[in-house]
Image: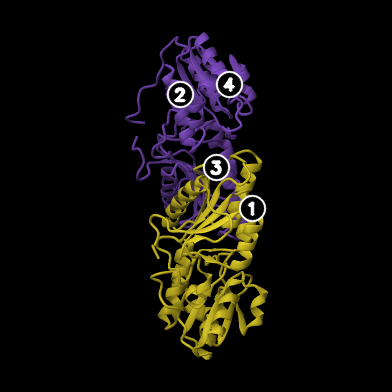
Chain colours: A yellow, B purple
């Protein structure tokens, strides 16, 4: 990960982890604790995993902006990591806001239109404007980031490498539109682009398209490529794969998965690679044309 | 449709209609007959509608290249229209080819990799190299093409017009990659991009994403935009909407549908507009930025 900044340790300073779904928030919290930082998890209701209850935590809803700010100040927190899967999107027109939330409604309303990127960027700006520093999960837990090169026993075949390139170009293109981060190509043809459904649902669709003969159904054909959006702030929204991604890729009969090296996290890397090896899939980190080159 | 070429009549010359699914092949055949041309439908097995049996016709499979060429020559056909939906894609590795097909296997194999556009362009080149002239369905049945402006009682609201623009930009962008022709935007956010699944399946996905709260679920929110691919040859592959598209848009709770004026066909226009009017959707033809300007 040449060129990446040094990990932010700041021993002793408390760190808040604003937690969406999945295991990443817990991994980040554990890494911070190993580095000597007290941790408080702010768990997003209906999103965060129950596993976060292993750490000091507090549950909040989308509308609890005021309570959240108050609680962070009471804990003397200035550093904040936003990490984890968000599957629901708040509809700002029907959002229950607390009193502070109502006061800053105009700021909040701006957060919840436009693409995911706009939502997260808006949330980050809101926190930054109130004196918080936003750190990336990958700055706390460096081991999460995919390196360049093969990560599995299986390597890319020449045909798969071509599909990697085709799918990566498509994923970069839709990322520039702030739509999605992933695409699937089979025999050099892009068959699926990620929208609001997310990567796993897109892979389910590919499995279905193979079943009904809409795309060539050869076992171990096609690849998933996943990358960062060109204007994505990796501190708040780093693309991620994990065991579920590999399981979905297996179900879709893909040959493997390529992620943008340095810009995509692998949640539970050991388990992710174990599943890929068990099914003969490759997982590799690549530097796409138009990538960030870190 | 300023700037479009005059309809090709060529009274008396026989016309072959290579027919995929849906009603368009029959509409084109009927228009040709009205213009005084004898018609022969070449019906693609597992794709063409049984309704084509109202016309002189012959069934062929993907591999029957030689038999098809022979039959066209026997009928003294030189003009050919390729029209209708193709839901399956031949896997050229397992394609049963007749003897002529085997002889030209290298040409055929080239057709069946790459995007849809490549497949259809390859098929067109194959026919042209053997002396056929390929005409567009819209050159035979001009009434199929969407004009600019509102086609329904309902007009675009200002919010819907913004979504039209956002979705059209996304659709044009993925068209440039030869991936799809359509996108859905809700509240200025692109939530779905068309891949191999096709427009109707993409709309089913949007309905599902609203159901599970993954995208804002307001009734009559969001639009479908559909356009031609920048390098698409409209003679062989004009984007199409029809009654099924409107029905799927209703199920997805969309406010309406925008198509690229002059470059998208409306199959069964009366029925399509009737359904839209019955459900309060708008359908309009627009000239997108980056469109062909005809």
Residue where numbered disc 1 is placed:
A250
Identify the residue shown where x is 57% and y is 16%. B67
Residue A3: percent from left, percent from top: 38, 70
Q: CA distance from mark 4 to mark 3?
A: 24 Å
* First along the sequence among labels 4 and 3: 4
Secondary structure, mark 3, is loop
| Chain ID at mark 3 | B
- Residue B196 is marked as 3
Residue B276: percent from left, percent from top: 55, 41
Label 4 close to label 1 by CB (< 8 Å): no
Q: CA distance from mark 2 to mark 1?
A: 37 Å
On the question of residue A127 being in view, the answer is: no
Residue where numbered disc 4 is placed:
B64
Quarter of the view holding residue B59: top right
* First along the sequence among labels 4 and 2: 4
Residue where numbered disc 2 is placed:
B126
- Disc 2 versus disc 3: nearer the observer: 2
Residue farthest along the front direction in this orientation: A153
Q: CA distance from mark 2 to mark 3?
A: 24 Å
| Chain ID at mark 2 | B
Up-down relation of residue A227 to residue B245 (above or below): below
Quarter of the view holding residue A294: bottom left
Label 4 close to label 2 by CB (< 8 Å): no
Identify the residue shown where x is 45% and y is 26%. B124
Mark 2 and mark 1 on one chain: no
Residue A201: percent from left, percent from top: 61, 54
Q: Nearer the viewer, residue A37 or B150?
A: A37
Secondary structure, mark 2, is helix
Q: Nearer the viewer, residue B9 or B202?
A: B202
| Chain ID at mark 1 | A
């Amino acid at each position: 990960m040449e060129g990446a900044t040094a990990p932010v340790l700041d021993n002793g300073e408390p760190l808040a982890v604003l937690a969406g779904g999945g295991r990443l928030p817990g991994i980040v919290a554990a890494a911070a604790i190993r580095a000597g930082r007290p941790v408080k998890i702010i768990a997003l209701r209906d999103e965060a995993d129950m596993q976060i209850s292993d750490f000091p935590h507090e549950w909040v809803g989308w509308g609890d902006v005021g309570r959240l700010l108050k609680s962070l100040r009471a804990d003397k927190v200035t550093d904040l990591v936003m990490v984890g899967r968000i599957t629901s999107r708040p509809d700002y027109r029907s959002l229950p806001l607390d009193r502070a939330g109502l006061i800053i409604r105009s700021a909040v309303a701006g957060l919840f239109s436009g693409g995911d990127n706009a939502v997260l960027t808006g949330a980050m700006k809101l926190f930054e404007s109130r004196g918080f520093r936003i750190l990336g999960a990958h700055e706390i837990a460096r081991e999460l980031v995919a390196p360049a090169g093969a990560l599995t026993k299986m390597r890319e075949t020449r045909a798969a490498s071509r599909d990697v390139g085709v799918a990566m170009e498509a994923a970069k293109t839709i990322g520039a539109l702030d739509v999605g981060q992933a695409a699937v190509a089979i025999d050099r043809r892009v068959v699926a682009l990620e929208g609001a459904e997310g990567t796993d649902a897109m892979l389910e669709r590919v499995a279905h398209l193979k079943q009904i003969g809409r795309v060539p159904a050869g076992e171990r054909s096609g690849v998933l490529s996943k990358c960062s959006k060109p204007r994505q702030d990796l501190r708040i929204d780093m693309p991620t794969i994990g065991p579920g991604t590999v399981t979905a890729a297996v179900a879709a009969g893909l040959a493997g998965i390529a992620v943008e090296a340095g810009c995509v996290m692998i949640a539970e890397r050991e388990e992710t690679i174990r599943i890929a090896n068990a099914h003969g899939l490759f997982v590799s980190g690549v530097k796409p044309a138009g990538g960030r080159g870190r």
